[in-house]
Amino acid sequence: MPSQDSASLSGEAASAAASRTSHAKKYLAALGPGFLFAGAAIGTSHVVQSTRAGAEYGTGLLGFILLAVLLKYPSFFFGPFYVSVTGKSLVEGYRQTFGRSVVALFALVQIPVTAIIIAAIAITTAGLAGSLVSLTLSPPTVAVILIALCGVLTFAGGYKLLDWVNKVFVVILSVTTLFATIAAVPLVDWSFYPATAVSPLLSVTTFVTLVAVLGLMPSDITLAIMNSLWSEARNKTQGRRSDTTAEKIDFNIGYIGAAVLAACFVIMGAGVMHSQGITPADGAVGFASQVISLYTSTLGEWSGVVVGISAFTVMLTTLLTVLDGFPRMISASWYTFIRPADETETSRNLEGSPAFLVSLIGLSLLAVVILYTLMGNFRLFMDFVMVVAFLISPILAALNHFTANGPTVPPALRPSKLINAWSWLAIATLTLLSLGYIAVRFVL
């Protein structure tokens, strides 16, 4: 007959096992916004700019790209962090920390910026479609059709559809990209800064290119606000708030994954295009075809269709993601702004709301106008998108920092001294680089 002590030990072991299972389920349930972060990030910044950086500079810009990803970490992490300690998004945090005027100014600045990003993602997706099948329609027209289709799916499906579709296709592209990168490694010149780069390291041309590449690396800091809104939506769906540890695990998976894939596209561009002296095409369809050739050159002809479809679906998922995230952000800003000062924030379902629909239609129409007026040169257009994102990044980084350390967060729950120092370093560096870019382009 078992002793009382052994029975007690068995009970404790069972309790510990049940506790571990409960913790594992809690962390798995929290996964979602981090994957959406990766899905939104793995778009033009990776497929276009990272590949182009590798094609023109070999591995010369790889260290700078990884350093930028590391530097920006706190600015992005403050999004899910704020939700975990307050239950509110960063938009509401801006309102309670800085007031309604800052929320209004933030939304007004973001409207044209987000429309430009939507246009950039749509034209890249259209380019991938044109590289897979012969299309009689022009790339901007295909991009408009894609925006319309994704807009309908976003409005009808909401967070649950977005979460499921994004996870499937991000995993597929990640696996194929890792295999293609491994195959390209032997072809890479691993010099710190190859002599065959298109311009010297210490030159205005390289500095301007670097700013353009880093603008959306791993993404625009606006994604931190979108991430906080997705975390809030996930919490409403599950009926409970995820704690800081669960949010951090989810965020780190998406963030590290985006960083790894950024490095992969640089390495593929360096190994397959730079080593052979292939110049990146200026057109959307031409460049998309070159991206597909990165895979066929390393994995074989069989991979062309498979990877092409995978890359297209991931870009399509990115378009879906931003067509959910940006209208969600603008509509949240609107509801936060119009709320009277003496009223507290209420739990509002943004999906399907009138403000969300108006934001979705308005941003889509503005993106269509941009596609037909500013798309004369794909390369210049992409550089413009990245530079705009980079120039506003120090402002967004500062807003996120002060919100995460503001009066709405109890002192005991605020970020650690380490991550705050890290955040200050990011703000200072991004500010200096932005001022340097303005001086180089418009003063000197």
Image: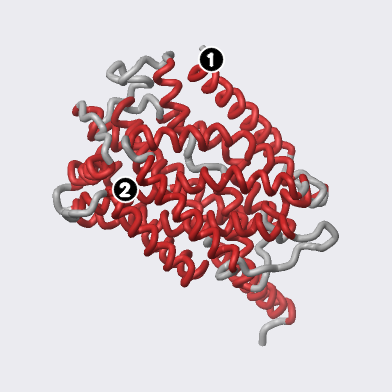
Q: Return the residue nearer the eye: 230 or 158.
A: 158
Q: Label 1 sits on what residue type?
A: Val
Rendering coords of residue 237 (x, y %): 60, 72
Residue 260 appears in view: yes
- Residue type, numbered disc 2: Thr
Q: Position of residue 341 (x, y in %)?
A: 82, 57
Residue at image location 40% in from the left, 62% down from the top: 150
Q: Is residue 175 above or below residue 206?
A: below
- Left or right: where does residue 154 sit relative to residue 79? left
Q: How is the image coloured?
A: secondary structure
Q: Is residue 350 left or right of residue 319?
A: right
Q: Is residue 60 left or right of residue 282?
A: right
Q: Quadrant of the N terminus?
A: bottom right
Residue position marked by numbered label 2 in the rendering: 177
Q: Is residue 440 above or below residue 283?
A: above
The residue sitting at 43% across, 14% down in the picture is: 202
Q: Classify 10 Å Cα crowding around label 1: few (below 14), some (14-19), many (20 and above).
A: few
| N-terminal-most mark, 1 or 2 | 2
Image-quadrant location for residue 60: top left
Disc 2 element: helix
* Gap in angstroms between the C-alphas marked 1 and 2: 41 Å
